[in-house]
């Protein structure tokens, strides 16, 4: 095995060919909606119904898509590395469940999951794929008006950070796939990997904001570049 412990960070680009819009590409989500209004804690506190509507719309889009060859290849790498006594840590910024539906067993959703709802009052989280509204009651505390998507908004702390930094520190290869490198702390992972002397690879449609920080880069559509990279890793 070239690298025994691989840390993989994915972003919206890995789900683009499944039909989910990315955020910052031409015509992307942030070209149509104001981040502050629909994806920040301040926006939610200002107008919760507007934010719930934005995620209800996005959740509906998520319902009609399938994992693509990139998701499936990453799941194969995870299984293959486990069989060889290695490990793959898959950390995603995406709130879709396409990695799981592509076969990945352990996915760290650092920005949460759109198919789960959380009570803003008691914090209880449960799978929920219907529309969220202000008059929905929480199954745990019974209060209404506080049900929100289990998603990390701008200004909120991402999830699993301790686990992520521990896995990153212990990796011997860091791979960033399908992310523009704009959003922190995820965008800072490559710098942490470099500081720890870890080999870094970027796989993306085009060089990202942080491309110069990577030792290696492979550019093209994820459904082609990711399976090709995984095939090489498995064959090595
Ligand atoms: C935090 C919600 C403290 C769910 C999201 C100034 C400087 C530095 C930081 C900040 C700053 N001001 C404010 C901040 C902090 C802020 C931030 O980073 N702002 C940015 C905009 C400057 N961050 C936060 O608030 C975060 N919290 O910092 O807490 C903290 C810090 C450390 C430790 C503890 C606490 C919270 C950030 C989470 C925000 N929530 N989403 C949702 O609605 O989805 S972020 C949102 O952007 C999504 O999660 C998305 O995944 C993420 C990143 O975007 P990308 O995935 O990269 O998508 P993008 O469209 O940008 O790029 C797509 C890429 O794919 C492109 O490169 C494209 O070329 C490529 N591509 C396209 N098609 C394909 C392809 N690649 C391959 N194949 C293809 N076919």
Image (tube, grey):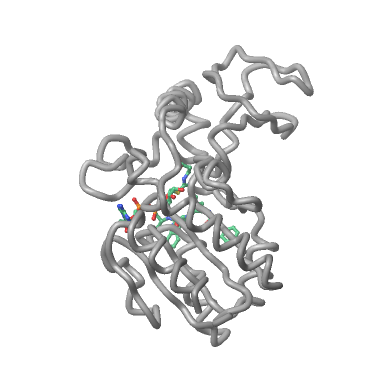
As drawn, 221 above or below 146:
below
Q: Residue at x 50, y 25 (%)?
A: 48
Q: Residue furthest front?
A: 235
The answer to which quarter of the image holds residue 214 is bottom left
Q: Residue furthest bottom?
A: 197
Q: Residue at x 38, y 66 (%)?
A: 228
Q: Residue at x 61, y 72 (%)?
A: 168
As drawn, 216 above or below 144:
below
As drawn, 101 above or below 206:
above
Instruction: Give the x, y percent position of residue 92.
Output: 52, 54
Q: Quadrant of ligand 1?
A: bottom left
Labels in figure, total? 0
Instruction: Give the x, y percent position of residue 155.
Output: 52, 48
Pick the front one: 94 or 122: 94
Q: Residue furthest right?
A: 141
Instruction: Give the x, y percent position of residue 9.
Output: 50, 62
Q: Residue furthest left?
A: 26
Q: Is residue 28 left or right of residue 178?
A: left
Q: Residue at x 63, y 74 (%)?
A: 5
Q: Is residue 206 left or right of residue 71?
A: left
Instruction: Give the x, y percent position of residue 191.
Output: 48, 77
Pick the front one: 39 or 202: 202
Quarter of the image with the N terminus is bottom right
């Amino acid at each position: 095995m070239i690298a025994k412990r691989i840390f993989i960070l994915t972003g919206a680009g890995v789900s683009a060919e499944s039909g989910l819009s990315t955020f910052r590409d031409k015509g992307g989500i942030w070209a149509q909606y104001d981040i502050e209004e629909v994806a920040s804690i301040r926006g939610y506190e200002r107008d919760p119904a507007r934010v719930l509507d934005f995620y209800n719309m996005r959740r509906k889009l998520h319902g009609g898509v399938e994992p693509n060859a990139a998701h499936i290849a990453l799941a194969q790498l995870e299984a293959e590395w486990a069989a060889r006594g290695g490990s793959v840590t898959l950390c995603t910024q995406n709130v879709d469940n396409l990695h799981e539906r592509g076969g990945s067993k352990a996915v760290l959703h650092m920005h949460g999951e759109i198919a789960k709802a959380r009570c803003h009052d008691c914090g209880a989280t449960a799978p929920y794929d219907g529309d969220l509204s202000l008059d929905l009651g929480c199954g745990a505390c019974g209060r209404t008006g506080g049900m929100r998507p289990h998603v990390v908004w701008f200004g909120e702390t991402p999830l699993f950070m301790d686990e992520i930094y521990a896995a990153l520190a212990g990796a011997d290869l860091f791979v960033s796939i399908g992310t523009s490198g704009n959003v922190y702390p995820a965008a800072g992972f490559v710098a942490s990997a470099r500081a720890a002397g870890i080999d870094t690879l970027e796989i993306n449609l085009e060089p990202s904001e942080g491309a110069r920080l990577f030792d290696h880069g492979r550019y093209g559509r994820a459904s082609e570049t990711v399976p090709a990279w995984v095939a090489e890793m498995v064959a090595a």
